[in-house]
Image (cartoon, grey):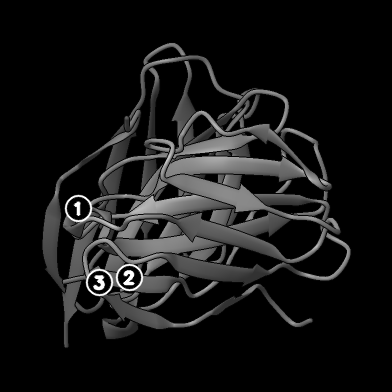
């Protein structure tokens, strides 16, 4: 595709509910990243995929957060038992490979609001 | 945790003036990148400078990197109202270029 796409663009849910956020990376990009951006802050790293496997999930805040990328393309970030503190913009990025100097291309983000 | 710290947190200038933003970081890096974010929209990559480079230009943008001081600066020359946005530095490290962002500088350019 032309760029990284994320759906939905906005998600409002109630405390305790389960949500899924989807990321569709640029075609052919093997590396995929999830970040979370709270209001007034810079994005914070959550998880990195190379292909289908999560190479680094050290940024996931707790075990309520989980992400998958079963076919090495689309990724889904799953949040169980949502809390108000989970409210943020969730950003996805992809890049063309593992190299240390590859640019990451960001999607428009999903704004999650937990009431 | 965030590694980069931008300075200033906010900057207000007139169109045509230059804008300088600074970024400091703490650990060794592969590269340092600058991004722009308009209100409510995604991050746009501006420029990447590698750890073995000292200066890089792209259009009206000039980035410097001083690894001995663990700092970088972004200069936007002849600013325009359309440059109004938040600017973030991000350091890339590790074999897969995990990015660590600062809190950003909010730039307002007035016509």
As drawn, the label of residue A113 is 3
Q: Give the residue at x 48% y 18%.
A: B67
Number of other residues with Cα within 10 Å of mark 3, as a class: few under 14, some 14 to 19, many 20 or more: some
Q: In this view, does B25 lie to the left or right of A47?
A: left
Q: Is residue A56 left or right of residue B36?
A: right
As drawn, the label of residue A112 is 2
Look at the numbered discs 2 and 1 and tell me whether their residues touch, using CB distance below 8 Å. Answer: no
User: Which quarter shows the C terminus of chain A?
Assistant: bottom left
Q: Give the residue at x 80% y 38%.
A: A98
Could you tell me which secondary element the residue under label 3 belongs to? strand
Q: Is residue A24 left or right of residue A93?
A: right
- Percent across and percent down for residue B10 are 12, 56
* A77 to B92, vertically: above or below: below
Q: Give the residue at x 34% y 75%.
A: B38
Look at the numbered discs 2 and 3 and tell me whether their residues touch, using CB distance below 8 Å. Answer: yes
* A57 to B104, vertically: above or below: above
Q: Give the residue at x 25% y 72%.
A: A113
Q: In this view, does A16 lie to the left or right of A92?
A: left
């Amino acid at each position: 595709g032309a760029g990284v796409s994320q759906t939905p663009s906005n998600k409002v849910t109630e405390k305790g509910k389960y949500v899924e956020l989807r990321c569709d990376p640029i075609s052919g990009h093997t590396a995929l990243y999830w970040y979370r951006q709270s209001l007034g802050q810079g994005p914070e790293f959550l998880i990195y995929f190379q292909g289908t496997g999560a190479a680094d999930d050290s940024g996931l805040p707790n075990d309520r957060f989980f992400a998958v990328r079963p076919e090495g393309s689309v990724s889904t970030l799953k949040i169980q038992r949502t809390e108000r503190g989970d409210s943020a913009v969730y950003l996805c990025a992809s890049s063309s490979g593992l190299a240390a100097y590859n640019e990451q291309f960001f999607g428009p983000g999903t704004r999650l609001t937990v009431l | 945790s965030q590694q980069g710290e931008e300075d200033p947190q906010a900057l207000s200038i007139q169109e045509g003036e230059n804008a300088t933003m600074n970024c400091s970081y703490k650990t060794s890096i592969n590269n340092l990148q600058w991004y722009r974010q308009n209100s409510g929209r995604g991050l746009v990559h501006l420029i990447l400078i590698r750890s073995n480079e000292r200066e890089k230009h792209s259009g009206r943008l000039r980035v410097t990197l001083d690894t001995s001081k663990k700092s970088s600066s972004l200069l936007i020359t002849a600013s325009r109202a359309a440059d109004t946005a938040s600017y973030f530095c991000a350091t890339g490290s590790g074999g897969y270029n995990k990015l660590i962002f600062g809190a950003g500088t909010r730039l307002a350019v007035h016509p």
